């Protein structure tokens, strides 16, 4: 299969592992490859299999809807899409919310940037260093991570702000309060040298950047500055949404002192593998476009049936609460492991969104070779994890389905411990 893949697909399409694996089926928190090997899944297809593999409630909803009608487009009334949008609007925390459904997080962020620039009549965007917002032309242009930015050409003028990474950079030595004050001062200074931007786009916890985050309250402090200038706040919740952090349903709620964001984007986990993304904004912003628009595939009856069923399961079984409880146990277990491994610089995260940053022992230098080796060793031990990081891919990304059990968390931590000690 690998040879066939290379013969017809782009060279730049990344594959994990020296000997890539083909996943054929899954159940619960486990998946199997084409050779019959079973793995505990601690990455969930990049945080997308949010509840469980082959979740009966979701597969039943998809099957039943596919038996009625698969596609219609947004040109027709669509009951599953309306039901999904009603639920998301209520959960978003944004007053008088409107929801536009897309097929991916990239498309959601692309739409949010369109709304912000049209509403504000400005093509300037503030973004965070070390960020990632997708692979479209506009999303790449606000991504502050050189490893995922293939071009410097852009439809936008992007200005990068400090604050997304707490333990690296010029403010790392400061206390949390002083860190926030320094980042706010940097933002104030930046705005004194430019025309007013349309929006700040920020991930509450940076995903591809290695699960890094600022102290709680940074974006609330930013919001005071942004509001004085009329600048919108876009919260990219593609990876942090739906309770993955355990403590909050949305990542922005750790920065809620000055209210919700103007625009919220989501994707990944809500479809549990089905292709769903979307944008939530207050009506004034969402309705600012003065031309027609549609979505051919966004809000498909089948994907919306999956989204409604998956969201219902998430809430009925309190999976955010499970992420808090089991994730808290897992992160403490991994911190105990990391304390005895010289290559581990930091174990960080919230809920079931955990990063392990690796360095060359005795230094602060990123160690992507070690991250690759640990990922391979974990796979050999029966565990799938992800990788990420800013300047270098040196962070292990751990994000299991939110239904993870305590026993599975311990099993995964034990495999990771062996993998870390093998490098």
Image (cartoon, rainbow, N blue to C red):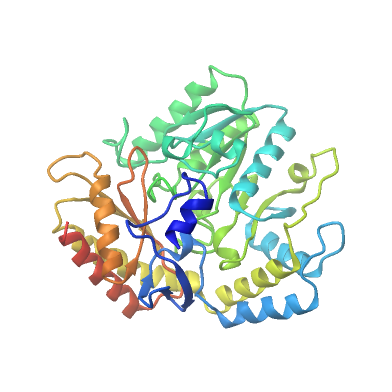
In the depicted structure, whether residue 131 falls above or below residue 49: above
Along the horizontal axis of the image, is 60 left or right of 340?
A: right
Q: Position of residue 365 (x, y in %)?
A: 22, 39
Which residue is at the front of the view, 98 or 337?
337
| Image quadrant where one finds the N terminus | bottom left
Q: Residue at x 64, y 60 (%)?
A: 276
Considering only vertical position in the picture, is 217 above or below 64?
above
* Residue 101 percent coordinates (x, y): 71, 56
Q: Residue at x 45, y 75 (%)?
A: 403
Residue 351 can be seen in this image = no
Q: Compared to 354, does 151 lie above or below?
A: above
Frontmost residue, 380 versus 389: 380
User: Which quarter of the figure is the C terminus placed in?
Assistant: bottom left
The picture places residue 308, in percent across and down from the top left corner, at 67, 71
Looking at the image, residue 90 lies above or below residue 406 = above
Residue shown at the point (49%, 69%) measured from the top left: 320
Q: Horizontal placement of 33 versus 332: left or right?
A: right
Quadrant of the image occupied by residue 61: bottom right
Q: Residue at x 52, y 35 (%)?
A: 127
């Amino acid at each position: 299969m690998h040879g066939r893949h290379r013969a017809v697909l782009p060279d730049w399409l990344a594959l994990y592992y020296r000997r890539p694996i083909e996943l054929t089926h899954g159940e619960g928190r486990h998946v199997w490859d084409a050779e019959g090997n079973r793995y505990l899944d601690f990455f969930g297809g990049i945080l997308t299999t949010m509840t469980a593999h082959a979740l009966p409630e979701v597969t039943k909803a998809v099957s039943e809807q596919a038996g009625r009608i698969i596609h219609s487009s947004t040109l027709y009334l669509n009951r599953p899409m309306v039901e999904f949008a009603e639920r998301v609007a209520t959960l978003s925390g944004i007053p008088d919310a409107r929801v536009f459904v897309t097929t991916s997080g990239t498309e959601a962020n692309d739409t949010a940037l369109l709304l912000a620039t049209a509403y504000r009549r400005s093509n300037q965007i503030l973004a965070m260093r070390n960020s990632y917002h997708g692979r479209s032309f506009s999303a790449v242009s606000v991504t502050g991570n050189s490893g995922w930015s293939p071009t410097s050409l852009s439809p936008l003028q992007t200005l990068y702000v400090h604050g997304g990474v707490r333990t690296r950079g010029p403010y790392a030595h400061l206390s949390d309060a002083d860190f926030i004050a320094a980042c706010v001062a940097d933002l104030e200074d930046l705005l004194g040298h430019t025309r007013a931007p349309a929006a700040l786009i920020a991930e509450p916890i940076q995903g591809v950047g290695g699960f890094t985050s600022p102290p709680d309250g940074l974006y609330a402090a930013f919001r005071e500055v942004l509001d004085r200038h009329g600048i919108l706040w876009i919260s990219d919740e593609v990876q942090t949404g739906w309770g993955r952090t355990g403590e909050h349903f949305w990542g922005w709620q750790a920065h809620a002192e000055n209210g919700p964001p103007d625009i919220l984007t989501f994707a990944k986990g809500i479809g549990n593998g089905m292709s769903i993304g979307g944008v939530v904004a207050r009506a004034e912003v969402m309705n600012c476009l003065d031309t027609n628009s549609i979505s051919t595939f966004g809000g498909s009856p089948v994907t919306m049936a999956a989204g409604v069923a998956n969201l219902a399961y998430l809430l009925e079984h309190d999976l955010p609460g499970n992420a808090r409880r089991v994730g808290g146990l897992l992160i403490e277990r991994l911190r105990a492991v990391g304390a005895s491994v010289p290559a581990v610089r930091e174990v960080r995260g919230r809920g079931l969104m955990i990063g392990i940053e690796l360095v060359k022992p005795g230094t602060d230098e990123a160690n992507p070779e070690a991250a690759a080796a640990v990922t391979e060793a974990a796979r050999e031990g029966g565990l799938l994890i992800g990788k990420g990081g800013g300047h270098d891919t040196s962070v292990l990304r751990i994000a299991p389905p939110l239904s993870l059990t305590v026993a599975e968390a311990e099993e995964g931590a034990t495999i990771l411990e062996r993998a870390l000690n093998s490098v």
